[in-house]
Amino acid sequence: MTKGRVFAIIIVTLVLALMVGLFVTGMTRGAAWVLDVDSPAEGGEKNGRQEFSDFLDGLEDAFDNEDGGFSMFNFSFGWGHNWGSEFKNGTIVTNGSVEIGADDVKGIKTNWIGGRMTIKTHSSSEILLEQTSKSGSIPEDRRLVYRIDDGKLVLREGAGRRVSSRTATDLVIYLPDRFTFVEDVELNGIATDIVAEKQTLTCHDNIEVSVVSGNVNLEGADSEGSIKMNSTSGDLMLTGCRALRMVEADTTSGGVSFSEVRAGESMEMNTTSGDVYCENSRAGQNVKTDTTSGNVKLIEVEVGEKIEAESTSGDVYCENVTARKFESSTVSGKATVKSSNISEADSSSTSGDIAIESKKAMSELRCNSISGSISVTLPTHQSGFTAKYDTISGDFRCDFATTSLGKHEVQYGDGSANIYFDTTSGDMQIIKG
């Protein structure tokens, strides 16, 4: 092995060791804050954990600077939370409320810990920020801090470098009636519920809401870009919202609910553990839903192109949906489509029944079930189809007058539509609607 290669290996090893060390240090710092290592031992003397915390403070200063330099600790763990450089400095609000000229604000970015963040409107022409605490007094390290940078209103909870107090506070952002943000809206929270009341949040750009352990509820939000919501543990709800591009909701543990939502391009609803529900909504192109452990329910959803619905452990149920194509996949659950208008369908189930009913004549249909029955209802005006089916243990039945084309293949009418059935153990039937 050449000296150059040995030297390169040594450099790479040192870099990786430094990165791992910084990551472990960040994790340790979060755990230390949760254990209150920021509080000196009785008598004012520092204990071992406090000295270690001071060491971490010094290490952090080496990597974090006011100009937005690298920081491993911008989002640490526990209640003790160090804001990144974007949230440093600003005006501290000592009396709980402040008014800001609305003409100076184009966009907004917030970070909040605990409590609740609510957006409302009021009759004033100014923006009012109001912070309250259930205990009455607001701890000094939790006071509202704000500043305006090039038209962006940046605000946070925490007058100090860190927020360590356990006393959560609430924030209400009062916007002038019919106020519109012309730049991005970004709302962030930790253990915080974020609520935008009816027709209060309007933006010419994108709206993004992200919480770590908290619920999000937007009512009447309007974006000329996209609306995106994310929560690691909490429910996500959209009601009467509109976006010219995409509407997305993603939560690790919680439900996703859309009602009267309009998306110019597509809608996506994803959760690892929870139900997905969408009603009276419309997307110009696609709707995609996915849940690992939960049910998917779509009622009166209209899509220009395709609906995709997946559930690992749960049912997929659709009623009065409209799309050119419908796709579904369930591992342990059934798939049901009732009174819908679809031209194509592709549905599979590992352990569950498949039932598809279309009021519109279909051009192609594929259904696959390992352990479950397959039932398809076609309209009486269906001009024709060619059906092929394969089964190990199951019967095939058809209400239409068909002609046999050979083993496991029949034709009705002009035979124009293609139908494929495949089941390991289950019956198959085509019903005349």
Image (spheres, rainbow, N blue to C red):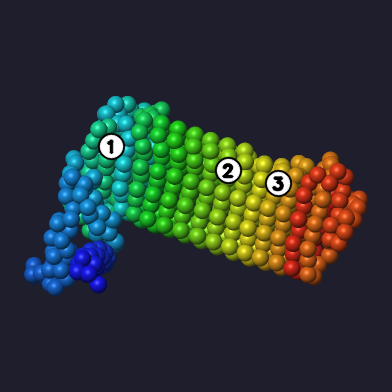
Mark 2 vs 1, N-terminal side: 1
Q: Which residue corresponds to mark 3?
A: 344
State the mark number for residue 319: none
State if disc 3 and disc 2 touch (CB < 8 Å): no
Percent position (x, y) of residue 360?
A: 76, 41
Say which residue appears at 33% left-offset and 35% top-offset: 107
State the mark number for residue 286: 2
Dividing the picture into quadrants, the one containing residue 315 is bottom right
Side of 288 relative to 177 (left or right)? right
Whether residue 81 can be seen here: no
Q: Quadrant of the N terminus?
A: bottom left
Mark 1 vs 3, N-terminal side: 1
Say which residue appears at 58% left-offset and 39% top-offset: 285
Mark 2 and mark 1: Cα distance apart in space: 34 Å
Percent position (x, y) of residue 27?
A: 27, 65
Q: Which residue corresponds to mark 1?
A: 153
Percent position (x, y) of residue 209?
A: 40, 46
Where 177 falls versus 335 (above or below)?
Answer: above
